[in-house]
Amino acid sequence: MVVGYRRWRTEHIEALHAASEVIATANGPVEVSRRGEGPPVLMIHGTPGGHDQGFFAEFLVSAGFSIIAPSRPGYLRTPLATGSSWSGQADAVASLLDALEIDRAPVYGASGGGPTMIHLAARHPDRVQALMLECAISGPLSVDVPAFVLRLLTSTLAVWFQLHLFRRFPTTVLRGLLSQESTLSKADRKRLADEIAESQTDLDYVRELMLSTTPSDRRRAGLDNDLALFERADPFPFDGVRCPTLVVHGTADGDVPFEHAERSQREIAGT
């Protein structure tokens, strides 16, 4: 088992590196993966995550767009020094666009990527054509999970073991994930887990989502930094966001309360 785990981890890291490149920008190194051809869409990942969460936007590739998916500072091969604040991350993304010679692009992101996106649109309005905020954080957020429990749940070994269980008992694992990630009733969790288990496309999506949290040690600096920033009450520059904005959020989201969507809709003029 130990040999199998080590081999899997090594192969996973190699695949992550093969799918991305590190670009030198004016703000520091930024890792990025690119998918598809056509007009670019910038994809900002959540917490935890990395460039591999660009798979969230695979539907856009099918529609004829290309996806530019950076790893935010502290995740994978983008060092935290590239931008440890929301404004610093926004500036790093703008510098990445400079390095890639992209003038403007729509920006799509989720969850913990929300603050970076909002700051990017406010600080660099000439670079952002439109925003799509999906279950995005738009204000202070407290994570009510003890640090040691969070580290255990997000450890690479724990995810590896969970992936093994997922292959054999997908419905059971799905119900557990839904109990952690949603506020759905037990009956609704069972119904949704059964629906997902009947779709290979949905099962592949869940597997990719689980994989995109590992290896945890390569994402730890970004995760810890995000959690510290979430706790702070720094104001968001909503007044500076002038581009058309679409806010999408589930009312049963167990990670980011629906009030974050309501705040974005209320405060951003273009929603």
Image (cartoon, helix red, strand yellow):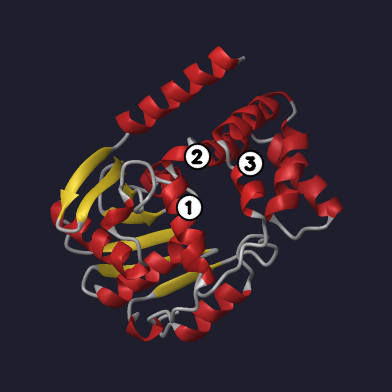
- Asked if one can make out residue 211 in the rendered structure from this viewpoint, the answer is yes
Q: Are marks 1 and 2 in contact (CB under 8 Å)?
A: yes
Report the amino acid beneath label 2: Ser
Of labels 3 and 2, earlier in sequence is 3
**Residue at left 40%, top 60%?**
108
Report the amino acid beneath label 1: Leu
* Residue 260 falls in image quadrant: bottom right
Identify the residue position indicated by label 3 in the image: 152
Towards the viewer: 60 or 6:
6
Q: Are marks 3 and 2 in contact (CB under 8 Å)?
A: no
Identify the residue position indicated by label 1 in the image: 223
**Residue at left 72%, top 23%?**
168
* Vertical relation: 130 (above or below) 159: below
Of labels 1 and 2, earlier in sequence is 2
* Vertical relation: 237 (above or below) 257: below
- Provide residue 88's location: percent of width, then percent of height: 29, 66
Residue projecting furthest to the front: 148
